[in-house]
Amino acid sequence: MEVAESKSKKAGGRLCSTCNQRKAALKRPKTLEQICRECFYEVFEEEIHQVIVGNQLFKAGERIAIGASGGKDSTVLAFVLSELNRRHNYGLDLFLLSIDEGISGYRDDSLQTVKRNEIQYGLPLKIVSYKDLYGWTMDEIVKVIGLKNNCTFCGVFRRQALDRGASLLKVDKIATGHNADDIAETVLLNILRGDIARLSRCTLITTGEDGPIPRCKPFKYTYEKEIVIYPYVYVCILQEAGLLLD
Ligand SMILES: Nc1ncnc2c1ncn2[C@@H]1O[C@H](COP(=O)(O)OP(=O)(O)OP(=O)(O)O)[C@@H](O)[C@H]1O
């Protein structure tokens, strides 16, 4: 232990504040602690597990759709949820649910990511498109209404499409990749708009419990920066262990 410590100090590095054995590799954005890759990987997953258990987000036997956009948040969510489900025997049936808004050059690319995730994580994927549901793609809608306010249309349609997809999959709940930064942003927006009703709802970890399909945010307390660091750290650990395939 003393040898490891002096070696690490000589190399100009500090020891990990969690294990006190390995060299610290990063400063955790959430706590500013200096931490090694292995401990970061462990605490990142463990904190999400504690959020799931502490807030009773899921019950054994439930079918859960992960809202999978192909972006970083929902991709990491799908990976972490499938790992935790196996490791802690949550007993969940997990599915990937993607909404294809029909935005060429944007969603068609990210859908390729989701299709890869279906294979990599072994989770069944359902894609629901605006074209099938509403008869219009988002590109066609923009041609008619123009660019102004199109995000509002798209947001409302996506919400509904997620509910339709969830009912086709017969799931009990939808989990989304909204993280702590997204929630902070929504709080500020609702304050600026003076929308008191939304302000009180937007920080809830589970919403829509009185509706057909509740939604939950397992990343409510997870910082966006850490969601970005996590896959990088995972790859480094595999690389160092010689477990990364070319
Ligand atoms: N097209 C979609 N299909 C399925 N789920 C979606 C889709 N778009 C968004 N979601 C869900 O809503 C969450 C928040 O979406 P938002 O558009 O704010 O993207 P984001 O914060 O960049 O997340 P991500 O990195 O997962 O795209 C996503 O993490 C995902 O769970």
Image (tube, rainbow, N blue to C red):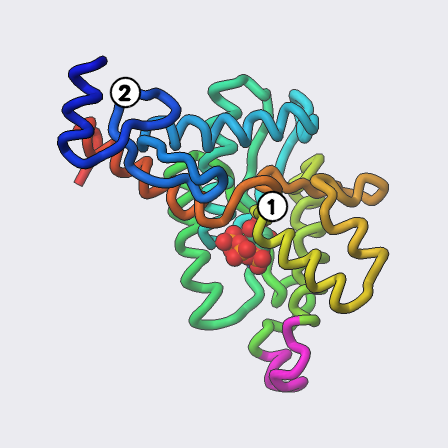
Q: Is residue 162 magenta?
A: no
* Residue ID at (46%, 68%): 106
Mark 2 or 1, nearer chain start:
2
28 or 244, which is in the foreground?
A: 28
Res. 69 visible in picture: no
Q: CA distance from mark 2 to mark 1?
A: 36 Å
Residue 198 rendering spot, x and y as whole percentages: 80, 56
The quadrant of the image that shows the N terminus is top left
Q: Which residues are magenta?
A: 140-151
Could you say which disc has been placed on residue 98 in the image? none
In x, y percent, where is residue 215? 70, 43
Which quadrant of the structure image shows residue 119? top left
- Quadrant housing residue 182: bottom right
Give above or below for 52 relative to 188: above
Look at the numbered disc 1 and give the secondary structure of its residue.
loop
User: Residue at image x 42%, y 39%?
Assistant: 28
Residue in front for this viewpoint, 235 or 215: 235
Q: Amino acid at mark 1?
A: Thr
Dot 1 beta carbon under 8 Å from ligand 1: yes
Determine the secondary structure under disc 2.
loop
For label 2, the residue is 21
Tell me which image quadrant ligand 1 sits in: bottom right
Amino acid type assigned to the residue bearing label 2 in the image:
Gln
- State which quadrant residue 21 falls in: top left
Q: Which residue is mark 1?
A: 176
Quarter of the picture containing the C terminus is top left
Q: Residues within 10 Å of mark 2 (few under 14, many from 20)?
A: some
> Circle 1: is it few (<14), some (14-19), or many (20+) Cα within 10 Å?
many
Q: Position of residue 88 (x, y in %)?
A: 52, 18
